[in-house]
Image (spheres, rainbow, N blue to C red):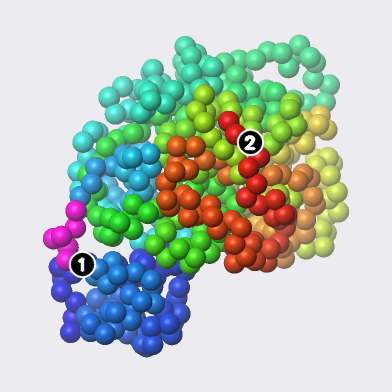
């Protein structure tokens, strides 16, 4: 019998979330793969017996798999980032700090390997959605940024109050090069203050246009907090039991899937984001946990100085996930004989780089500065990709000769690796979230052998101190 058009079918959503293929589920439930495909596609409705088998195999009630559409509730949520007005909007949902956060499934955010099932669909917007540079109040993004839910605006966060107008006048392009004078380095513009606020290095030598674009994007992030009405496409109890983590390491997704198998009612929503983007999302109340791997050469510490500065007095804990090797990915056998970052210029090496705020980019810039090499003398320095996989694919395809990533990524793609730095990867959690049961369930799995085995097999990580609290802020 064909499924009722008013029946909401969550089978594929739950199966995909648990990392199971149709064949995996079929084997576990004792049915055929064709039966699974037919139910997911809406070709037919399963019998009571098959519904019970599917629910048992997935560790959930039957009502989580099938429900009538008219019974679906609606909730008011806050968009985690600006979107274009007028577009149909699918979202993932989670409850963070007592409010619903909607994460738009747009562009690359809509995919893992296959398209991500939605938790809900936006049916109404209570304020204008940010389009191209217009805030919710209708003012231009370069004007005074708004405060959001009690968090400081970006100017106060980075000690730039009253100077945001600098984004209107990009500073002159300037980089550190051999022979640069101390007087040249002492000329710090308001946008350089922003770079210094990131504390990756004393003065980050970004070009003026890139700095201005970065600051303007930060201001727009502060204005894109629109409330929307979302029609749920999944069970609200499941959504309530969601932990949201932002970070860039593959360890997070492996940990998340292992934890969900350990706690079938737990759901972990992993947002791929660089370290600074993850920390800012935590400050804005959009996520529960931020993953970071940033090094501060002024103090010799990983992550702690950045968190202390960004949280502006709020309490958090830092828990170690592992220590990974960061370095240059090169083709197998290292045919061009790259040994150090100095060779990038001397041998005419073409690289591919990461975006501002990313730990990999900060590492590259720091190493080039230590060698007194101008950043923009490195070929491909402004060729930007947004994740470790794309760094590796660029080297594999010959688009680039090298790029900064990790030893585990190099091993996964069969590439050569030149180590540059051992970086500690920490999880940053606001203390107010530590009392939430889903967060407690997730953190409790850090010591579980199933989780640790997944991370050990990945390689390139030292997890001997996994779960250790390294700082209370």
Front disc: 1 or 2: 2
Say which mark, if any, is on residue 281. Answer: none
Quarter of the view holding residue 196 = top right
Q: Position of residue 190 (x, y in %)?
A: 57, 16
Q: Looking at the picture, does residue 346 appear above or below residue 249?
A: above
Q: For residue 69: magenta?
A: yes
State how far apart marks 1 and 2 are (Cα).
45 Å
Q: Is residue 182 visible?
A: yes
Magenta stretch bounds: 68-73
Q: Residue at x 60, y 19 (%)?
A: 193
Q: Residues within 10 Å of mark 2 (few under 14, many from 20)?
A: some
Q: Position of residue 208 (x, y in %)?
A: 59, 24
**Residue 28 or 295: which is nearer the viewer?**
28
Relative placement, left or right, of 308 versus 287 is right
Q: Is residue 81 visible?
A: no
Q: Residue at x 46, y 49 (%)?
A: 439
Callout 1 secondary element: strand
Q: Residue at x 59, y 67 (%)?
A: 450
**Residue 465 or 338: which is nearer the viewer?**
465
Q: Which residue is mark 2?
A: 471
Q: Residue at x 34, y 69 (%)?
A: 60
């Amino acid at each position: 019998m064909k499924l009722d058009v008013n029946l909401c079918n969550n089978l594929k959503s739950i199966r995909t979330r648990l990392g199971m293929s149709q064949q995996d589920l079929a084997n576990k439930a004792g049915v055929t793969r064709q039966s699974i495909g037919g139910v997911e596609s809406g070709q037919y409705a399963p019998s009571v017996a098959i519904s019970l088998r599917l629910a048992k195999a997935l560790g959930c009630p039957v009502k989580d798999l099938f429900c009538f559409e008219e019974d679906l509730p609606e909730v008011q949520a806050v968009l985690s980032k600006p979107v274009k007005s007028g577009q149909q909007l699918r979202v993932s949902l989670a409850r963070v700090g007592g409010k619903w956060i909607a994460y738009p499934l747009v562009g690359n955010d809509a995919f893992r390997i296959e398209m991500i099932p939605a938790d809900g669909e936006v049916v109404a917007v209570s304020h204008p959605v940010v389009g191209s540079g217009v805030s919710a109040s209708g003012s231009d993004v370069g004007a005074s940024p708004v405060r959001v839910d009690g968090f400081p605006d970006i100017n106060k966060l980075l000690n730039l109050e009253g100077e945001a107008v600098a984004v209107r006048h990009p500073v002159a392009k300037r980089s550190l090069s051999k022979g640069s004078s101390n007087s040249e380095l002492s000329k710090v513009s308001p946008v350089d203050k922003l770079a210094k606020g990131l504390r990756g290095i004393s003065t980050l030598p970004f070009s003026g246009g890139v700095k201005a674009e970065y600051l303007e994007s930060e201001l727009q992030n502060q204005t894109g907090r629109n409330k929307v009405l979302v029609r749920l496409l999944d069970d609200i109890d499941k959504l309530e039991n969601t932990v949201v983590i932002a970070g860039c390491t593959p360890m997070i997704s492996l940990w998340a899937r292992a934890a969900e198998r350990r706690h079938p009612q737990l759901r972990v929503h992993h947002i791929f984001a660089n370290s600074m983007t993850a920390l800012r999302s935590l400050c804005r109340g959009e996520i529960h946990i931020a993953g970071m791997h940033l090094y501060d050469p002024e103090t010799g510490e990983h992550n702690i100085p950045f968190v202390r500065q960004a949280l502006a007095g709020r309490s958090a804990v830092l828990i170690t996930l592992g220590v990974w090797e960061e370095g240059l990915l090169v083709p197998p056998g290292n045919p061009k004989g790259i040994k150090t970052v100095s060779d990038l210029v001397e041998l005419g090496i073409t690289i591919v780089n990461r975006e501002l705020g990313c730990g990999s980019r900060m590492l590259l810039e720091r190493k080039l500065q230590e060698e007194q090499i101008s950043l923009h003398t490195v070929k491909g320095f402004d060729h930007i990709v947004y994740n470790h996989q794309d760094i590796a694919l660029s080297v594999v395809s010959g688009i680039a000769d090298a790029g900064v990533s990790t030893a585990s990524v190099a091993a996964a793609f069969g590439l050569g690796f030149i180590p540059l730095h051992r970086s500690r990867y920490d999880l940053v959690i606001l203390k107010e979230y530590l009392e939430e049961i889903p967060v407690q369930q997730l953190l409790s799995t850090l010591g579980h052998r199933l989780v640790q085995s997944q991370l050990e097999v990945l390689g390139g990580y030292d997890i001997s101190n996994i779960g250790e609290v390294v700082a209370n802020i």
